[in-house]
Image: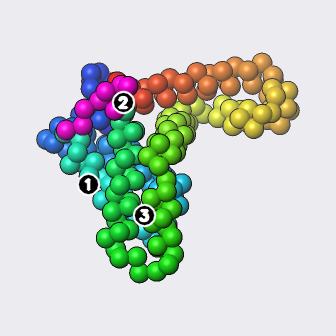
Amino acid sequence: MLHYDWNTQQTLIQRAQNPDDHQAWEDFVQFYESFVKMVLRKSNISFYEEEDLVQSILLKVWKGLPNYEYRKENAKFRTWLSTIIRNTSITHFRKNEMESHKKDKLLKNIEGVSESKIEQIIDTEWNEYVAGLAMEKVKEKFEGQAIEVFRLSLQEKNAREIAEELGIKEDTVYSLRSRVKRRLKQEISNLRELIEVR
């Protein structure tokens, strides 16, 4: 479970830069390990190769974090991370001697993926990832039909259709949807404050 501390003036990345803050690193891994896996899959890395690569990437991030310096215009954290993912993947496949044509082809695919392409994948996946984490927190806060109303609204069903399907009033649909949406936005904002570089 992630340790939330809304009173801290440091983001998770800033805290994880301190090699003595072991809890920050554990929280960092909790957030980023599954995210790195998502990016690797989008980059056509097989499940077979995934675990070794994830560990190698996280090790490089851990070693590099104390020296990472945030510059808003040209040194976003996700840009830095995308470079590590791409370069570590290329090094991994080169080092493993490419025992098959399939691996040789995979290496060419990875080498052909530019850093900007990986960064683009990372930005897209990151937004979805943070929204998913926030939605899990929102589900803990609501009981009854609120989450179901919100889920159906994401399927582009209108208030009348949702009301009929769930056997509730349209006004209730509007109210529940609004409450969940407002809470989701707040959770996304809280997560970004916690885990992104300011």
Q: Which residue is mark 1?
A: 59
| Residue displayed at 32% across by 43% down | 28
- In the foreground, 88 or 124: 88
Q: CA distance from mark 1 to mark 3?
A: 14 Å
Q: How many marks?
A: 3
Mark 3 or mark 2: name the one nearer the start of the chain. 3
Q: Which residue is mark 3?
A: 50
> For mark 2, does the 10 Å Cα neighbourhood hold few (<14), some (14 to 19), or many (20 or more) residues?
few
From the top left corner, tell me how far across and down residue 23 is, in percent.
Answer: 23, 42
- Can residue 70 be found in the magenta stretch? yes
Q: Which residue is mark 2?
A: 74
Could you tell whether 54 is left or right of 189 in the image? left
Mark 2 or mark 1: name the one nearer the start of the chain. 1
Q: CA distance from mark 3 to mark 2?
A: 29 Å
From the top left corner, tell me how far across and down residue 100 is, in percent.
Answer: 46, 80
Span colored in magenta: 67-75
Element carrying mark 3: helix
From the top left corner, tell me how far across and down residue 168 is, in percent.
Answer: 80, 28
Mark 1 or mark 3: name the one nearer the start of the chain. 3
- Decide whether the magenta segment is chiefly helix, strand or loop: loop
For the question of whether residue 47 can be seen, the reply is: no
> For residue 134, which numbered disc appears in the image?
none
Badge 3 vs badge 2, beta-carbon distance below 8 Å: no
| Residue displayed at 29% across by 35% down | 13
| Quadrant holding the C terminus | top left
| Quadrant holding the N terminus | top left
